Image (cartoon, rainbow, N blue to C red):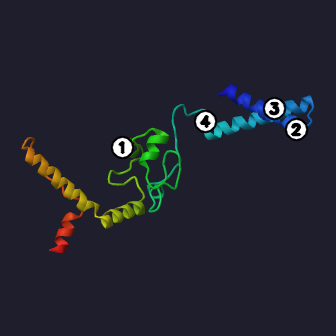
Amino acid sequence: MASSLLELTASIVSSHASVTEMSGDDLLLELQKVHGALQKLEVETGEGMEVGGERGPSLTLKKAFQPDQISCMLCGKTGMKTLARHLAQVHGVKPGEYRKQFGIPSNQALTAKNFSEARRRMAQEKGLADNLAKARAVRAAKLAAKGGAEKKPVKQPRGSKQKQQMSA
């Protein structure tokens, strides 16, 4: 880090000297002052002490998972509706690894709650659960007609038990 600190100091002082007329003594004094300030900043931030410890922004789970948006606990980016794609594209992290790293419970969705609710309502309005049940029934009938493979039980869509109880 020392060589880059010297390079940074030289760059700062040369920029300053290019716009301000300085004597040789002023230049040496400025170099010492800037170098000392940069060293102090380096020690305060602990940049030299941490070798490979990547620390992201400190967000609590409550702040990271808000009803209308999600914030990435790695980089601090906010305003997202879903997190899985951001994790894969920007950080190369799988959702399971992310959950483990920050102690996020498995029942916590990596999507904004209001976004999930809106998608759920839209799917129910369009009858997608019924379409899925019909498609599964058709597939099961085709498999039964072939008579080959073992018959798998047909999965009921979420909320179908509630619909049956309500209609009865």
Mark 1, mark 4: which one is toward the viewer?
1
Task: Determine whether label 3 and label 1 are within 8 Å by CB.
Answer: no
Question: In the image, is residue 12 above or below residue 70?
Answer: above
Query: Which label's residue is closer to the chain start, 1 or 4?
Result: 4
Residue 28 position, x and y percent, is 85, 30
Say which residue label 1 marks. Answer: 96
Say which residue label 4 marks. Answer: 47
Query: Which label's residue is closer to the chain start, 3 or 4?
Result: 3
Q: Residues within 10 Å of mark 2 (few under 14, many from 20)?
A: few
**Quadrant of image for the N terminus:** top right
Q: CA distance from mark 1 to mark 2?
A: 53 Å
Task: Determine whether label 4 and label 2 are within 8 Å by CB.
Answer: no
Q: Which residue is located at x 43 percent, y 40 percent?
A: 93
Direction left: furthest residue: 147
Direction top: furthest residue: 3
Q: CA distance from mark 1 to mark 4?
A: 29 Å
Say which residue label 2 marks. Answer: 19
Q: CA distance from mark 3 to mark 4?
A: 21 Å
Residue 29 position, x and y percent, is 85, 33
Q: CA distance from mark 3 to mark 1?
A: 49 Å
Query: Which label's residue is closer to the chain start, 4 or 2?
Result: 2
**Amino acid type of the residue tagged 4 in the rendering:** Glu
Query: Which label's residue is closer to the chain start, 1 or 2?
Result: 2
Q: CA distance from mark 2 to mark 3?
A: 15 Å
Q: Residues within 10 Å of mark 4 (few under 14, many from 20)?
A: few
